[in-house]
Amino acid sequence: MMLEDHVALVTGAGRGIGKAIALALADEGAFVVVNYNGSEARAMETVSQIQEKGGRAEAIRCNVADFAACREMVEGIISHHGRLDILVNNAGITRDNLLMKMSEEEFDAVIDTNLKGAFNCMKHISRQMIKQRSGRIINISSVSGVAGNAGQANYSASKAGIIGLTKTAAREMAARGITVNAIAPGFIRTDMTDVLSDGVKDSIMEKIPMKHFGDPEDIAQTALFLASEHAKYITGQVICVDGGMVM
Ligand code: NAI
């Protein structure tokens, strides 16, 4: 198995894309720490599914927007497992609104979770990865961060920020054997996108050359590749997994 003896932390892994990534990493032998902030039951479901297939996992509650809580989570994992090899910053939220109508709270909540959350985990993990002289950081951005999207000023800014963070961290840590890359999903069928109206879904579909939506597994397989030895010479990149939406 490709990730035997590796320890991975996947944020927001109780459902959707994070859950698919957790399952894919565990399938290749990684011990997966399933981070969650909301439903403990759903996080435990991810852990059980991994264990039923003979994999190893545990769930840890932590709000990624909380700097001190992230430090505690990361230190806990390192003291328990002695290492941390893979970080997937997946936790994310939307609070869509037109810029003119967007409240300060809507803007701050999205930046705090999506962008600062990624910074918090990367900052606390970087020291350990530098000590190990190895590590893989995979940040989940979005096509909204690459191309912008009406109604998502906060979300697009957070996801574009993730790309800057990814490229800077990649430059800072490349010589220490650590790769940092971003995945920019297009429209993936999850609870996050289920809430959109049929009208919105139709208008998004028009922009997808492949004419169908993606599945969490599409993102999970890309994350698995970036976490594996096959991707050892790839860093600072943004990979769009979007059926051709952004070219
Ligand atoms: P989702 O809403 O199903 O899952 C997000 C997960 O993050 C949830 O489990 C949630 O509890 C967790 N989370 C939220 N705030 C958190 C916090 N403060 N601390 C810890 N966990 C927290 O969404 P989905 O679709 O699985 O999205 C996963 C990632 O992919 C997000 O970053 C999202 O922005 C991104 N993405 C999703 C796309 C899609 O079409 N579904 C497209 C582009 C990007």
Image: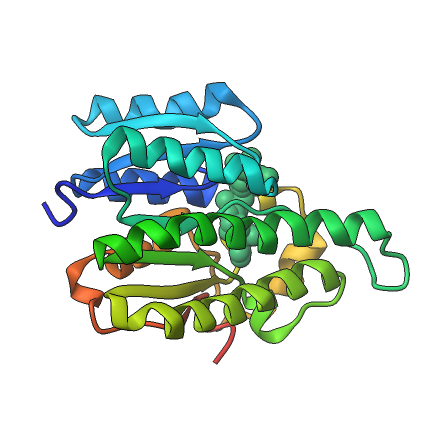
Q: Nearer the viewer, residue 235 or 82?
A: 82
Q: Residue at x 26, y 66 (%)?
A: 176
Ligand 1 resides in the quarter of the picture at: top right
Q: Nearer the viewer, residue 98 or 193?
A: 98
- 149 relative to 121, above or below: below
- 16 relative to 214, above or below: above
Which color mode does the image show? rainbow
The image shows residue 71 at horizontal and vertical percentages of 48, 39
What quarter of the picture does the N terminus occupy? Answer: top left
| Farthest residue, direction right | 100
Q: Residue at x 43, y 67 (%)?
A: 169
Q: Note whether residue 143 is visible.
A: yes
In the picture, residue 231 is in which quadrant? bottom left
- 172 relative to 56, above or below: below
Count of numbered tags: 0
The image shows residue 235 at horizontal and vertical percentages of 32, 72
Left or right: 194 as drawn, with respect to 76:
right
Left or right: 1 as drawn, with respect to 94:
left
Q: Residue at x 59, y 68 (%)?
A: 160
The image shows residue 237 at horizontal and vertical percentages of 38, 73
Q: Note whether residue 237 is visible.
A: no
The image shows residue 199 at horizontal and vertical percentages of 71, 55
| Farthest residue, direction left | 1
In the picture, residue 240 is in which quadrant? bottom left
| Farthest residue, direction bottom | 247
Q: Residue at x 30, y 65 (%)?
A: 179
Q: Nearer the viewer, residue 196 or 148?
A: 148
Left or right: 94 as drawn, with respect to 14:
right
Left or right: 17 as drawn, with respect to 7:
right
